[in-house]
Amino acid sequence: MAKTTLNKVKPLSAVDHKKLGLNKVALLALYRYMALSRLLDERMMRLQRQGRIGFYGTASGEEAAVVGSAYALKAEDWVFPALRQGAAALMRGMPLEVFVAQCIGNALDVAKGRQMPVHYAYRQVNFVSWSSCIATQLPHAVGMAYAAQLKRDPVVALAYLGDGASSEGDFHVAMNFAGVFKLPVVFFCQNNQWAISVPLAHQTASTSIAVKAEGYGFEGVQVDGNDVLSVYEVTKKAVERARSGQGPTLVEAVTYRMGSHSSSDDPTRYRSEEERQAWGAKDPIERLRLYLVEHKLWSGGDEKALQQTLNDEVSQAIQQAESAPPLAPETLFTDVYDTPPPSLEKQAQKQLAYLEKRNER
């Protein structure tokens, strides 16, 4: 990991881990997943530039927001992600090789190549697929929360969004419905200052995104999104409120997108290097690393060993994912209907016969 010099960010965290009930094991888990997220971004972007995957969107600079919020959930809770929450899926149990395969779209991809890269889903850990149409996951999360309320199922929906999503109609529909029915949902906004090339100042005239919750009758809270312990504390309280029947919360984690919006974007065309460097001095991973060192929980040797371990794990996952075969062509026809209609069976037979003739099956 590249070292940065923190620009006098003191204290490194606004809260002490012991007051949050977090021990050394928990702290190191937070650090590990943040470091893994950063490393994955670097390695996956290289794959994209080499033409081995088609698209990627990084979470670099936002790791504390993702990892700190996801750590506040129970296993039975549900996650409705946006673009940069892949680390949350890994934390909840998505295998690393499946994570990589989703960006390839082969037989190891649970979405069978029918979803855009970096649009992760993993049913086994209640991690729901999402759409590139901004904010559509928010009504989905509210629907799940409403169902949980009706069934008296004590689970919580954590719905992620970016600052740009707060301008979408789905955001307001979801907030209003959640507020009226006091649903067990937490809206978690990663305010990374840019919605592709649109700055926050052109996104909203309100004093914050968190304040928007007031119009819908529930609490909004703003937190330092680069302080993983503060993110965990605020999200944990919001999750507990939701689970106890006290309704939703809008959490705004103020952070920064250090890289491009995606592999298709050039951020140098719309933002300054000075701005990027200023936020780089507040690097969330470096802040947690220094916090660990300050509490005598980490050393240079630990860092070197962790980076080697993570590199090896990612290399192995990439090898496994790329070794998986292409999808069987018949899956085009078998996943739509339980009992396919005759017209679809006829199309399948014709297509498969064509592939047999070309020796492509």
Image (tube, grey):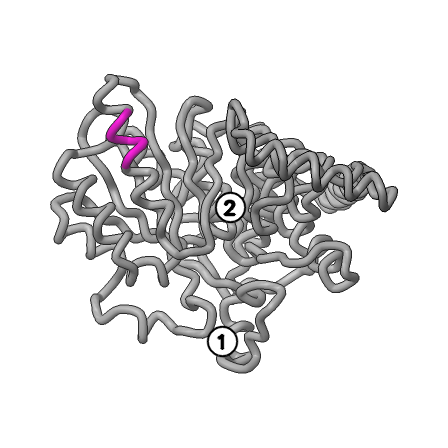
Q: Which residues are magenta?
A: 143-147
Measured in 3D between alpha carbons, the distance from the residue under mark 1 to the one under mark 2, in whole angstroms, is 24 Å
Task: Name the residue at 79% across, 37% down.
Answer: 324
Determine the residue located farthest toward the right in the rendered image. Answer: 359
Compare residues 283 and 254 and report the one nearer the observer: 254
Q: Quadrant of the C terminus?
A: top right
Q: Is residue 126 left or right of residue 45?
A: left
Name the residue that disc number 1 marks: 275
Q: Is residue 144 magenta?
A: yes
What residue is disc 2 on?
Answer: 85
Is 148 placed left or right of 321 in the picture?
left
Residue 87: x, y in percent? 56, 42
As drawn, is 189 to the left or to the right of 264? left
Q: Amino acid at mark 1?
A: Glu
Q: Quadrant of residue 138?
A: top left
| Amino acid type at mark 2 | Gln
